[in-house]
Structure formats: structure tokens, C-alpha cells
Amino acid sequence: MPLVHIPGSKSITARALFLAAAADGVTTLGRPLRSDDTEGFAEGLTRLGYRVGRTPDSWQVDGRPQGPAVTTADVYCRDGATTARFLPTLAAAGHGTYRFDASAQMRRRPLAPLTRALRDLGVDLVHEEAEGHHPLRITANGVTGGDVTLDAGQSSQYLTALLLLGPLTRDGLRIKVTDLVSEPYVEITTSMMRAFGADVRREDDGNGVTYAVAPGGYRATTYAVEPDASTASYFFAAAALTGTEVTVPGLGAGALQGDLRFVDVLRRMGARVDVRDDRTTVTGTGEVRGLTVNMRDISDTMPTLAAIAPFASGPVRIEDVANTRVKECDRLDACAENLRRLGVEVATGPDWIEIRPGAPMAGADIKTYGDHRIVMSFAVTGLRVPGITFDDPGCVRKTFPDFHTEFGAAFAELRRGMSGGPSAN
């Protein structure tokens, strides 16, 4: 199996764009992800008056430590959760009136814990329609900083947004966290902040976790974006499922992204996994074992595991993933619905899904709910089940516009051996 070159990380690209915009000087981002989400983030920066230059392999951002270059702006965040949560926080550090809106899908996703924390810090913020949701308007006059309490039990992005704001405040921030999901994403944030010159510390006194962020701003730098570990999960899962081998260069032992831990789940299921400094290889062994696994910290890969679970030798139970119900769609229900369409026995609860082994039926139409991860996950199922179709295959443009071409090329030999394969309606 040839090397599979995965596009840049969405999570890292979004954070890098924020950091570059806030830094003093011009930052160059190497191999950023170019997708609907990241283009939407860059477009939002442009609307706020930041200069973003693009070449095929890099983006250059002229930082403005003082905040947006314009005093009024109307920003459309598309479907991007990072855009919709990070850019209002960036704008709050400036001076002016800024309005943010988003797609119907993103309007449904919650913002309340973040906007409540911003208001506690003195930010003049109004939700124009439903409280705790887009659209919203910020009348910005800088942020003093201080102490704030945050519930990040629905999304770690709330905490990331506040952490990124910290160095832009006058006095710095101390963020007491009462609950936190997907903590590895916060580790990405703090590591990247340090790469841009910030001072951020995690303190645990036994009674809870507090993040302390010093004032002082950010320094421009050159930053290489590593391949997206969530996207790599589909290729790794496909190797485990089909008894083939996949190597992803650029994603290895030093990777920032916690979602690379998905390969540990595949190892428990019987795959061979080799994580080197600069690459990761997964080799299927012909064995896919059932298991019970807590995926709280790698919940974006829950659909990937659900999509291969019917082929396991025993039940697959995925626990502690309540936050997947407030992603682009309710991913727990979406996975259950589509597995049932394939004739698979599934049970769900508030924060878990259990999938019984059984041969899926051919020819099922997968309901995507406009969610890129549902499409890419069930494309893996399609390597073993002929005739799978998707009602909205194009929604992969959110993170991987060329997914169908690249995935098809990587597993072309397998697909030729089938009577059919995943396709669009």
C-alpha cells in the first residue's frame, strides 16, 4: 500500500490563523488545510480587516495585536464551529462593533458557555435571536482580563477560545474549568500558543483545574501544520478492516493531535500499529475484535469506529461521547440510524452506542445529515459492503474536498474486487 498524504489538520489550521492574526508581525503557515471551514475562517479574518495571502502550499497573515483593522464588520461563519467560536473572541479584543452569523446547521450548535464567560469578562455581547446561539453582536472595547469560570463539558472549543484570548487581555486570564471534554484539543491549543510566544500554564490543586494565561501578546513565526489525525482515522480504519496497510507520513510520536490515539483502539481490536517519530503505519491482520472503549477525549473518531463495528467478532460499545450529540449533527443518532439502514443491531443511550456484529446489507443509502464525518466514516464501511450511496457526498468539502478521489485511489484494488462501492446518488 503506498503512502497516504493526509491534508493539514483543521483544528491546527484554525488555531494557527487566530494566532497569526493576533501576533506582532507576519506569520507563514506551511501546508494549511484548504477546505470550506478553513477558507471560511480566512474569509472572516479578511472581513475583520486582516490581510491573508495565499500560495498553493502556504498562507501568510499580517498580524494586528491591536485587533481588527475595521471598526464595523458583518462576518458569516458558514458551518465552521472554530470560526463561529474563535472569531468573536478575537474581535472582542479589538475596538468596534462586529456582527457574526452562521449557517442553519451552525446556528443550532450551542455557544452559551463561551458567551456567558465573555460577558463575565465585561464583553458587551448580544444574541440577536435565540439566546446562546448565533447570530450575535459584539461591541468591543478590549478585554481587561481577570478570573472567569467556564463549563467546557459540551465542547473544548469554549476553553480554547478563551485561552487564545488570554494574551490579548490587559491583565491576563485565569480560567477555572468545571468540566472539560476532548482535553487533547486543549493541549493542542496550549502547545501552539507557546510556539507563538505566549505564557500559559495548567494548574491542578486537587480541587479542580485552572488555566493561567499571562498578558503580553503573541510573536509572529513560521508554523508547519501537521496532517489531520481525524481524517487519517478513516484510512487507518480501512486498513484494519480490509487486512491492508496504510502509512501516513508527518503524523507520528510527536503529533499534537489526540485523535492519533485512535490507532490504539485499532490495536486493541487486532491491528498492528507502528508509530514512528515521523509516520504512523496500521496493518490489518484479518482480525477485528469487539471491545468497550471510552472515547471522551477522541470523540471525533467515534463515527469511524461505529462504521467498522459490524465486522467485529463481538459487540463494540463506545462510551462517554455525549458531546457528539451537539456536533454538525447528533452523531450518536446518525450512526445508529445508518447502521440500522444496513441491517445492523444497535442500541444507544445518552452518551453511549453499542453495535452488535452482523453482516451489513448491500445497497443502503446513507443519510449524511450534512456531516462530513458521517460520509467519510461510512465510506470505510463501503469497502466491505457493495452499493452504499450517500444523500450528500459533497459535504466532505468542510474538511477534505478531495476525500472521495483520494480514498478511492488508496483502496482502488479492493474496490475493483467488489461488485460495487460507495458512490453518490
Image: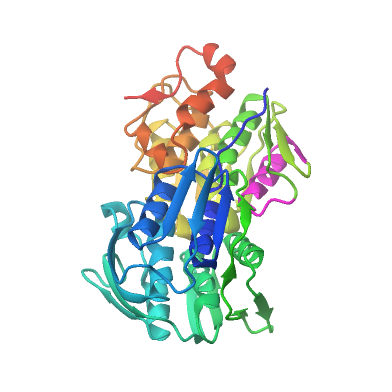
Q: Classify residue 92 by image quadrant.
A: bottom left
Seen in the picture, residue 78 relative to 305 is either above or below; the reply is below
Residue 24 horizontal/vertical position (percent): 55, 68
Q: Classify residue 313 by image quadrant.
A: top right
Residue 368 horizontal/vertical position (percent): 36, 39
Q: Is residue 352 visible?
A: no
User: What residue is at 55 percent from the left and 76 percent from the top?
Assistant: 167
**Colouring:** rainbow
Q: Is residue 236 visible?
A: yes
Quarter of the picture containing the C terminus is top left
Is residue 265 shown left or right of residue 402?
right
The residue at the far left in this view is 129
Of the pair 228 and 283, the residue shown nearer to us: 228
Magenta span includes 109 = no
Seen in the picture, residue 369 relative to 408 is either above or below; the reply is below
User: What residue is at 78 percent from the left and 45 percent from the top?
Assistant: 277
Which residues make up the magenta segment?
254-275
Is residue 423 shown left or right of residue 219?
left
Seen in the picture, residue 164 relative to 322 is either above or below; the reply is below
Of the pair 210 and 320, the residue shown nearer to us: 210
Is residue 242 shown left or right of residue 107?
right
Residue 325 horizontal/vertical position (percent): 41, 56
Magenta span includes 268 = yes
Of the pair 27 and 326, the residue shown nearer to us: 27
